[in-house]
Image (cartoon, helix red, strand yellow):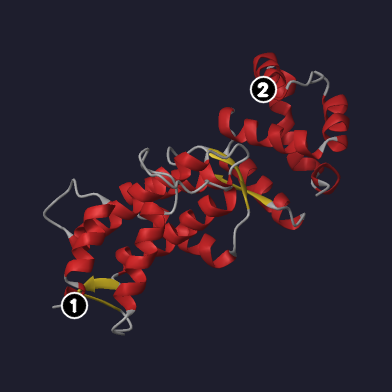
Amino acid sequence: MNFVDERMGEATNVLGYFVVNDQHREKLSRIVDVPLPSGLRDLLGLLEANPDLLLDTVDYIVYYCSVPPPIVAGLSLAFEEARSAFTIGFDGEGHCGLQERQPAELTQLMNEILSGRDEAARQLAAAWSSAFGRTPDLKAACDAAVVAVEEAAKPVVIPNDQRATLGLIIKALEAKPEKWTTVTGADRDIEIVIGMLRLVWTGFTRHGGDPTPIPLSAELAQMIVHTAVLLVHWFHSGSIRRVT
């Protein structure tokens, strides 16, 4: 991605935060361990020569510098037009940040879920940003994915127990699978749902006493978050529901 060359206007607007704010520039310099020049032309030249530093700089600015929404929108368009592997998204607290671009279908589902602004959406946003952000936290991503699915599934499976864990939700489905159905009505659909819930619940090292813990790779964490997106969407939309 030659972001500086292709979208100089957006780059100049954003990097202006560092020209007028020494504190932010010095803070980012400490984070990336690279001296950042105070002049805009010199800064643009440095970032053009160092794509990773450019990404870190944009990530820092949109997170910490209260960038106006129109500039964020211009940056998002710039990354899209440059066919970047990154885009701008939100974490569980509503902060902007760079994230690895994900398949369009999953991104659309995420946007639908986030429009609900409930606890499941907040936790799923946290899982997404932790899995796909510039500084991934894989354990945090999986933990938040678990909570997101718990919040979405409890009203459907165990509505009278607000403290139910995902483990209890799985046990309830396994004990009487005939009490729930899916939008297709196929007999084995609930078994598939249970398998997906188990992937989110036990697909990574959750319990310290596990004699054979599964190493938590980036690929596994991302798979768990993708699965959580589907599950939250299905429970929210009524695609998984009680038999009436």
Q: Position of residue 204 (x, y in %)?
A: 45, 49
Q: Quadrant of residue 10?
A: top right
Evaluate whether residue 90 shows in this view: no
In the rendered view, does 19 fall on the left or right side of 63? right
Residue type at mark 2: give it: Ile
Q: Secondary structure at mark 1?
A: helix
Evaluate whether residue 121 shows in this view: yes
Residue under pointer 1: 178
Give the crowd class for mark 2: few <14, some 14-19, many >=20 residues within 10 Å: few
Give the quarter of the figure containing the C terminus.
bottom left
Tag 1 and tag 2, C-beta contact below 8 Å: no
Q: Quadrant of residue 65?
A: top right
Q: Extreme left residue here?
A: 160
Circle nearer the viewer, 1 or 2: 1
> Compared to 126, does 77 lie above or below?
below
Q: Which badge, 1 or 2, is on the more N-terminal residue?
A: 2
Q: Nearer the viewer, residue 116 or 145?
A: 145
